[in-house]
Image (spheres, rainbow, N blue to C red):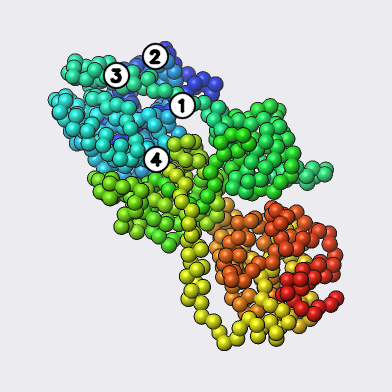
């Protein structure tokens, strides 16, 4: 439901895109009066379309139900039947100062995902607490989620003060307890306002029944919220959604596509892509079916060509050189709210979505947690927020500070710096299971994979035949040979040609296509990333056994980057990798032990590779 009103009461008007907007979210436990507060604001400011109030009152009379201001917002029949807000209702109104978008987020525990959606882009929040019921579990959860989403302007509205006879002591108790809870989460509410939304006390007008309160009304506080810094004035952050390459009529450009989260960019600007750290200069800004703008700013979804045709992948983060860059790493501390039905556990892989990046992620450590009832934070967390607690999992509806580790480097910002690129979600299977924000980079140390490989090697049982005996008998040592090239077909052709020569000349070799490890990758982008990481893990473990058996184990890895090779080197340890690049690749030149032009003849390619393998002492006494 969207109500759009002008300065003249009772008239509808479209909200234009070029007029300043302020996004506000109203959250709180179910039945604490969120929709009532918004409905009262619309009525008291004369912001309803003509006849709307009378129509709702008439409907209540026909159905023998008492009128409630919440009915002005609860547009869905299912909501009115159950008396709860299921989805996020949005309304628009304007004061003398500016226009507002208000989101009425659901308070029921089963619809917390919807609440997150409604609050995701808010610049300020009103958090309601029932003065008679007091602080409930979702009061705490919603406060934590608002904090995690980076909303810094939070005002707590203590509603239904009429039910406690406007008792200041009851108000003070709620303020003291809830302020302490929020401050443990690192959130500092601007103020607490006592109101009766039903009676209109301290909503748009002051009420004499609370003469002990001398602060602003809700409407005055809304107008006092400060507009966030214009996003285009912040450092450039553009998550790369995709890269398009057109080959008709000799067009070899790569067009980088994505939506700018913050900052701006012009043709000629130098940019860096993270985590690959590749640099380029913007050649042009491209718009679909429209004239290309001279400058692209936050919120615009456009394409960009580069003066250097560098090879980058979707999921990178484009930043401008000379500005504060995003951080890059595989470990970070984060606050998250777990919504999955199954708990988040150590040792299980989940999917992390951060910006355009899609990577596997694991829970390393639970640092502190607010338990599922929402009643308290573990005392160990209050005494020392940096120390881990004795809890190996995060349960449903827990609010936790955790240490996470991704399977490959990702670019991110901290929540206190740039909120947009600090926010993430975690997917369990096909369901969004958590939302969160990055708090800090974690200290470097052994990764989960390094620990697992180290444990594997400690427990590795050797056979009676050693590497020296196999080398003497096979006339070569074990080696993992990886072909990398942008044109997969050409890399596969040369890899198979090498395998054929080795076999025909009595060498022990085996070629394995990456797809044979796990099958064809899924079409879904997120599943595709997860499956590729699983392929790399299985391939690395197979390579460890094949090279230990003294084989020349060959595979092709199209579109491989340095991280892929580093992972395979780790998994294949203590044996080494032999990397062959064919034509253009994403790798730096020094990453390869052998480089082949894309148009090289097959026999020449085999000769070059055998020479390199001979120089390394892997293959002996060969001839073509």
Tag 3–tag 2 contact (CB < 8 Å)? no
Which of the two labelled residues, at mark 4 and mark 1, occupies the earlier sequence position?
A: 4
Q: In which quadrant is the C terminus drawn? A: bottom right
**Cα distance, mark 3 to mark 4?**
26 Å
Q: Nearer the viewer, residue 340 or 110?
A: 340
Q: Is residue 136 above or below residue 20?
A: below
The residue that mark 3 highlights is 216
Which of the two labelled residues, at mark 3 and mark 2, occupies the earlier sequence position?
A: 2
**x and y, in percent, of residue 119 in the image:** 41, 35
Provide the secondary structure element on which disc 1 rests: loop
**Cα distance, mark 3 to mark 2?**
24 Å
Q: Is residue 407 left or right of residue 488?
A: left
Q: Is residue 315 above or below residue 8?
A: below
Which of the two labelled residues, at mark 3 and mark 4, occupies the earlier sequence position?
A: 4
Identify the residue shown where x is 48% and y is 66%. Answer: 452
**x and y, in percent, of residue 371 in the image:** 28, 50
The residue that mark 1 highlights is 228
Identify the residue shown where x is 50% and y is 72%. Answer: 456
Tag 1–tag 2 contact (CB < 8 Å)? no
Which of the two labelled residues, at mark 2 and mark 4, occupies the earlier sequence position?
A: 2
Provide the secondary structure element on which disc 3 rests: loop
Tag 3–tag 4 contact (CB < 8 Å)? no
Provide the secondary structure element on which disc 2 rests: loop
| Disc number placed over residue 9 in the picture, else none | 2
| Disc number placed over residue 148 in the picture, else none | 4
């Amino acid at each position: 439901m969207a109500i759009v009103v002008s300065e003249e009461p009772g008239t509808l008007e479209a909200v234009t895109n070029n007029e300043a907007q302020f996004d506000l979210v109203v959250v709180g436990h179910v039945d604490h009066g969120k929709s009532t507060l918004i409905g009262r604001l619309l009525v008291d400011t004369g912001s309803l379309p003509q006849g709307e109030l009378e129509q709702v009152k008439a409907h209540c009379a026909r159905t023998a139900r008492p009128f409630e201001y919440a009915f002005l917002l609860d547009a869905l029949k299912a909501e009115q039947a159950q008396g709860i807000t299921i989805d996020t209702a949005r309304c628009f109104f304007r004061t003398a100062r500016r226009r507002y978008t208000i989101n009425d987020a659901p308070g029921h525990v089963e619809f917390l995902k919807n609440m997150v959606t409604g609050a995701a882009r808010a610049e300020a929040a009103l958090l309601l607490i029932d003065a008679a019921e007091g602080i409930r579990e979702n009061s705490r959860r919603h406060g934590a989620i608002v904090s995690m989403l980076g909303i810094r302007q939070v005002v707590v509205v203590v509603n239904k003060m009429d039910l406690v006879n406007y008792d200041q002591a009851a108000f003070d108790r709620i303020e003291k307890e809830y302020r302490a809870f929020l401050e443990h989460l690192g959130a500092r509410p601007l103020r607490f306002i006592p109101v009766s939304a039903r009676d209109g006390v301290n909503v748009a007008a002051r009420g004499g029944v609370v003469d002990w309160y001398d602060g602003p009304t809700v409407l005055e506080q809304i107008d006092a919220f400060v507009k966030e810094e214009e996003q285009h004035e912040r450092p450039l952050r553009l998550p790369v959604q995709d890269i398009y390459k057109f080959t008709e009529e000799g067009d070899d450009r790569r067009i980088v596509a994505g939506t700018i989260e913050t900052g701006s960019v012009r043709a000629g600007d130098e940019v860096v892509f993270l985590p690959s750290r590749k640099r380029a200069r913007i050649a042009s800004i491209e718009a679909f079916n429209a004239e290309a703008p001279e400058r692209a700013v936050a919120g615009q979804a456009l394409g960009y060509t580069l003066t250097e045709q560098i090879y980058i992948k979707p999921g990178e983060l484009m930043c401008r050189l000379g500005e504060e860059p995003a951080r890059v790493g595989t470990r970070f501390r984060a606050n998250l709210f777990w919504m999955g039905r199954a708990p988040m556990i150590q040792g299980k892989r989940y999917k992390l979505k951060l910006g355009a990046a899609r990577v596997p992620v694991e829970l390393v450590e639970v640092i502190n947690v607010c338990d599922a009832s929402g009643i308290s934070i573990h005392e160990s967390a209050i005494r020392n927020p940096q120390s881990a607690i004795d809890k190996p999992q995060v349960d449903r509806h827990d609010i936790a500070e955790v240490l996470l580790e991704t399977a490959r480097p990702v670019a991110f910002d901290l929540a206190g710096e740039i909120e947009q690129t600090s926010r993430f979600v975690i997917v369990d299977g096909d369901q969004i299971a958590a939302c969160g924000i990055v708090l800090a980079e974690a200290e470097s140390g052994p990764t989960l994979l390094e620990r697992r490989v180290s444990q594997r090697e400690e427990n590795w049982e050797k056979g009676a035949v050693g590497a020296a005996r196999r080398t003497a008998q096979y006339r070569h040592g074990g080696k993992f040979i990886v072909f990398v090239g942008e044109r997969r077909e050409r890399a596969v052709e040369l890899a198979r040609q090498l395998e054929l020569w080795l076999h025909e000349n009595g060498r022990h070799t085996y070629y394995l296509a990456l797809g044979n490890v796990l099958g064809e990758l899924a079409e879904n982008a997120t599943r595709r990333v997860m499956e590729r990481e699983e392929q790399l893990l299985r391939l690395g473990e197979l390579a460890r056994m094949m090279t230990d058996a003294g084989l020349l184990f060959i595979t092709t890895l199209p579109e491989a980057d340095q991280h892929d090779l580093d992972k395979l080197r780790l998994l294949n340890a203590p044996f080494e990798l032999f990397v062959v690049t064919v034509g253009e690749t994403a790798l730096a030149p020094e990453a390869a032990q052998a480089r082949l032009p894309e148009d090289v003849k097959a026999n020449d390619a085999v000769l070059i590779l055998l020479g390199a393998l001979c120089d390394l002492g892997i293959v002996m006494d060969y001839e073509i």
